[in-house]
Image (cartoon, rainbow, N blue to C red):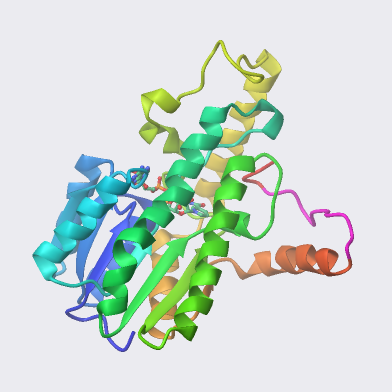
Amino acid sequence: MQTMAGRVAVVTGAASGIGRALALGFGGQGANVVLADVEEEPLDAAAAEVAALGVAALPVRTDVTDAESVEALAAATLERFGTVHMLCNNAGVGGGGLIKNQQLVDWKWVIDVSLWGVIHGLQSFLPHLIEAEESHVMSTASVAGLVSGPGLGPYNAAKYGVVAIMETLHHEMARDPDAYVGVSVLCPGVVRTNIVTAQRNRPEHLRRQRSSGAAASLTPEQRADARRRNQAVADALAERGMDPADVAAKVIEAMYNRRFWVLSHLEHLEEIDHRNGQLSRLENPTLLRSFTDGE
Ligand SMILES: NC(=O)c1ccc[n+]([C@@H]2O[C@H](COP(=O)([O-])OP(=O)(O)OC[C@H]3O[C@@H](n4cnc5c(N)ncnc54)[C@H](O)[C@@H]3O)[C@@H](O)[C@H]2O)c1
């Protein structure tokens, strides 16, 4: 992007964490911001913070798992501002647990939000981004979209999918003579957000069932293991999580410079190189160190 001042940015998952920081970051650059989230109260609070920066802020309650809801978000954006220049498909949820203990609802919930949310965003906004004189789309994946640590099966699957979609889109936009759309993917490490309580937004019909399926009832040991994993993530976030504002600054810098890869924690490059090196030699995968968020 040459400039963000006076432009229009849309951010999903904008009520909390990285999304809220992105919305504030765009506002700080003078952009008008459309904030989308399922959580209404924090969404309105975040929009008020953005508006306090002296730009227009439009909160739109949106469920990214629902194509119609995201379509309504695009309609609300166009009705208010007539155009859109920056899109951040950022909403995402994660839950830990070994694949052998997952229920179908665990896969469905995580993939619905973290992968289908991105697909819905592209479906509803890409034509408008292509129409704009200059635009940029970013989707939030994770280091879990580049290395598959244990204990995060659905999350890894969703985030690998997000990286694949954005890489594909990058190639397509670069070859499209009618489009001037920059493309980025954000792959953060540990960031100090509310992701550890992501279950707060889990719909009732996708909650774990006690009485059906292979992993229906966890043993006391499995439950203790799940609690231990959750606590490990909470501790990691609190102790060494990056400030979401620093992550947002890296995204904004990447948008100005049309850079694709946005990695907040460069120390993970070693793990990524290790994985890719093993692949190039057709060696079986090993991890350099266990991921705090997975094991
Ligand atoms: N925090 C980390 O360490 C970390 C690391 C890697 C990737 N990420 C990714 O960053 C993104 C943002 O997460 P965060 O860490 O800021 O967590 P967060 O929980 O603080 O924020 C996520 C926001 O998404 C919203 N959301 C959840 N379900 C939604 C839905 N169906 N529709 C619309 N909004 C919904 C939540 O209400 C919340 O406001 C996610 O994609 C996450 O996977 C986070």
Image quadrant occupied by the N terminus: bottom left
Q: Which residues are magenta?
A: 282-291
The one of 109 and 265 positioned closer to us in this rendering? 109
Instruction: Find residue 73 and report its horizontal and vertical position in percent.
Output: 22, 54
Residue 7 drawn at (x, y percent):
21, 77
Residue at point 48% right, 71% down? 169
- Residue 263, visible in the rendered structure: no
- The quarter of the rendered structure image containing the C terminus is top right
For this view, does 89 lie left or right of residue 29? right
175 shown above or below 105: below
- In the rendered view, tell whether residue 232 sits above or below residue 272: above
Residue at 40% x, 32% y is 202
Residue 67 visible here: yes
Decide if residue 78 is on the left or right side of residue 167. Answer: left
Residue 98 sits in quarter: top right
Instruction: Identify the residue at image location x=42%, y=56%.
Output: 118
Give the dominant element type of the magenta stretch: helix, strand or loop: loop
Within the magenta stretch, is there residue 283? yes
User: Would you place residue 19 above or below residue 256 in this image?
Assistant: above
Q: Quarter of the image holding residue 142?
A: bottom right
